[in-house]
Amino acid sequence: MECKICGNRNLKTIYSGKVRNGGLGQYTDMDIPVYQCTDCGVIWHENVLDNTDEYYESTEYRDSLEGSSKEEQFYCLHDKETLEKFKYTGTEIFRNKIVADVGCGCGAFLDFIYGVANSVIAVEPSKVYRQVMDRKGFHTYPYLNTAISEYGNQVDVVTSFDVIEHVEDPQGFLEDIYKLLSIGGKAIIGTPTDAPVMRQLLGQVYEKKLLFSAQHLWIFSDKNLKIIADRCGFKKVETKYFQRYGLENMLGWVKNKEPNSEVNSIIITETMNNVWKSQCCENKISDYVVLYLEK
Ligand SMILES: [Zn+2]
């Protein structure tokens, strides 16, 4: 077997056991071997979902992950992420532009973009969510290839958050984003890292309960994302690390060995959290990485 990203034959099996399947506390029936390339560092496992397209097109994925696929429930869970996404993108690149968000769910982020953009393209496999976004006036498509047939070489800005780790062919995914973009168009693509601090502190507890999941086929870092993006022919390829979770989350995990067990302590001030987050980012051991591309 060789690395699907860089072709290196020197791979390690870093985990073999049940992994999260959807929401917290739900696991696969089978043990899943998880591999890491010793050269580019990419982590992956084989796809164990039965019919992947149907899974994401139906309500099964959201029902399993979030307990609901209702529109209102989506906003309750995801509206708070919009501010974080604007930290990755800034606000100045969207005005009067054609903007596409790939894997946009119910379009919580695009709702904000819609106010300034010339037009908004929503790429989302879920049928229920596409019906909602049709109502909003977005141009909706289930997959990138269907969006390319109408908007190829025309899109100014493509965003995609927490999606590339789900796709079987990340190289093809970035190639399709390249095809969608106009010359000079920009793509901003974010994905969770392997959260090295948490793995060091918690090992398999963290890996089983949160990190490794049936739906996340890949865990990327700056090195392997750049390899894929360079092969697509982008003019500019840059990466930047971000830390989403704060000290209260890390200490909660350490104390209780469980997710969602945040420690509230007087010592965890905003200043402390800012120092912690910036140290994680500077040392590339934070929990999120964003790829910045220009065609
Ligand atoms: Zn590799």
Image (tube, rainbow, N blue to C red):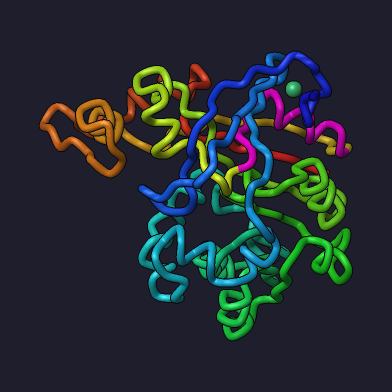
Which one is nearer the viewer's eye here, 204 or 37?
204
Residue 272 visible in the snapshot: no
Specify whether 80 is left or right of 181.
left
For ligand 1, the image quadrant comes to top right
Q: Residue at x 54, y 36 (%)?
A: 31
Which one is nearer the viewer's eye here, 98 or 133?
133
Answer above or below: position of 23 versus 126. Answer: above
Task: State the predominant SS element of the stretch in magenta.
Answer: helix
Q: Where is residue 22? Give x, y as percent.
A: 47, 53
Q: Where is residue 180? Give x, y as percent.
A: 82, 57
Q: Name the image quarter holding residue 241.
A: top right
Residues in magenta, as a range: 217-232
| Residue most extreme to the left | 266
Q: Is residue 224 magenta?
A: yes
Q: Name the image quarter holding residue 171.
A: top right
| Residue most extreme to the bottom | 135
Answer above or below: position of 59 versus 260. Answer: below
Question: How many numbered marks are there?
Answer: 0
Which one is nearer the viewer's eye here, 214 or 191?
214
Q: Name the image quarter holding residue 114.
A: bottom right
Q: Quadrant of the N terminus?
A: top right
Q: Where is residue 174? Give x, y as percent.
A: 78, 45
Q: Where is residue 243? Give x, y as percent.
A: 43, 33
